[in-house]
Amino acid sequence: MNLKIFAIMILLLLICTSFSVSSKIQDENKIKISVNNSENLFDRYVELLMKIGHKPSFVVCTIKGDEITFAKAYGYYDLENNKPTTLDTIFPIASVSKTVAATALMQLYERGYLDLDDDVSGYLPFDLKNPNFPDVNITFRMLLSHQSSITDKYDACHISPGDPEIPSRPYAPYLKDLLLPNGSLYVSGIWSDENAPGEAYCYSNIGWGLVEYLVEIISNQPFNEYCKDNIFIPLEMYNSSYDLKDINMSRLAPYYLYSKGNYYRLMHMGWVPCCNMRSTIMDLSHFLIAHMNGGVWNGVRILNESNIELMHSPQFSNYELYGLGFQFTDYKFQKNMIGHNGYPSTRMFFRPEDQTGVIIFDNSFGDPVGLLMDEGGTSLRYSLTEFFMFKTVSILLKSLFLKASISS
């Protein structure tokens, strides 16, 4: 990458960190932001980020305590039809979905249907063991902390053009065929042969297929119906779902891949609990506020405070940057935060020390300036735009958006 361009970008970012923003919520039933000229400067920064990163749309929400202090949408979520992005635009939230799936399972734990250190084989219609360590049980705690020793060797998430229907998922035979050595879908390397369950952190999307299936078995409800009854409706997340049939498709932002001057429309598909929830930024703010405030949003409790604290705490000494469905950051410009990344374009984090939170959505896939694509088309994991995303979080958390006075 051209070092001069990179230096200019960094300089612009450093200048932007000096922005001062003030805001005031004037109506308790409707978010109205009153800001000085520095909001215009912030808007220009976001627009610059979008231009450099070729992001079709961008939505941000900041929280202080249990109140939203800033929320704004930029750009067009549907390029083909020139539809402007609003706070009601529905986005795929990728792996942020894991926080909701984990909350669902923790509700069942709180109600006494399971113990976190139970062997999950006692709840499944098959015996789940790492064939390399057949004497070690796999527990709920391990699944929720990515310590099950299931790898991501198998491609559990898929990207396809257009807006395809998601087929039905017969989880019991599918998971059995995928994870058992005699299964028809079993592939070498799907289980770690170096570390037994509980010995090492190994991020696993496949493990969250098991989380969903266990929620269904224990609750005797389809996974999305359970989430609707116990999370979405109580938190008034009426535009949130793991199933496309419940989503207003005209408001759903697809992913766009930018390459060589063109945008290519994609739709993210994947296993439901690992990456396939859709939501608006305002809906998701209700969920984040609940987790920031001991399990309560707007007087509605979804989990006891002790179990919220448990989810936000490391469970294994071998890796202390993941709890039960929640990540902990140690990035230089995003330290001491709890939440989750949603690759490629969603962030939901809060900082307990000052009760500040931020959610960011966009619908760009991969690195939009071509830095992520080699000659073979292989997508690399990190990019300059990833840096922009994290830096934006830092700027927002340091800004006066989060220190706004709140009155009715």
Image (cartoon, rainbow, N blue to C red):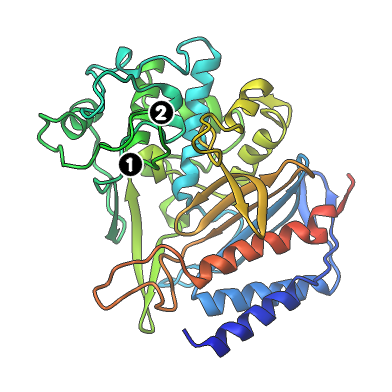
* Residue 302 visible in rendering: no
In this image, 290 relative to 404: left or right? Answer: left
The x, y position of residue 204, in whole percent, is 36, 41
Mark 1 packing: few (<14 Cα in 10 Å), some, or many (20+)? Answer: some
- Residue 371: tell me if it is visible: yes
How many C-alpha atoms fall within 10 Å of the one at disc 2: few (<14), some, or many (≥20)? Answer: many
Q: Which numbered tag is attached to residue 271?
A: 1
Farthest residue, direction top: 112
Residue 125, horizontal then vertical, whole percent: 23, 16
The picture quadrant where one finds residue 210 is top left
**For this rendering, which residue is in front, 398 or 43?**
398
176 w.r.t. 24: above or below:
above
Of callouts 1 and 2, the N-terminal one: 2
Separation of marks 1 and 2 at Cα, in angstroms: 23 Å
Out of 304 and 67, give the one closest to the viewer.
304
| Circle 2: residue type | Gly
The answer to which of 94 and 232 lies nearer the viewer is 94
| Residue occupying the point 33% across, 34% down | 195
The residue identified by callout 2 is 198
Helix, strand or loop status at disc 1: loop
Q: Is residue 217 above or below residue 232?
A: above
- The total of numbered circles placed on residues is 2
Q: Residue at x 79, y 61 (%)?
A: 399
**Residue 279, position as x, y percentages in the image:** 51, 47
Task: Tell me which residue sits at (42%, 40%) in the image.
Answer: 246
* Label ID, residue 73: none
Q: Where residue 295 appears, x then y in whole percent?
A: 66, 28
Residue 201 occupies quadrant: top left
The three-letter amino acid code for the residue at tag 1 is: Trp
Seen from this angle, which residue lies furthest front?
A: 194
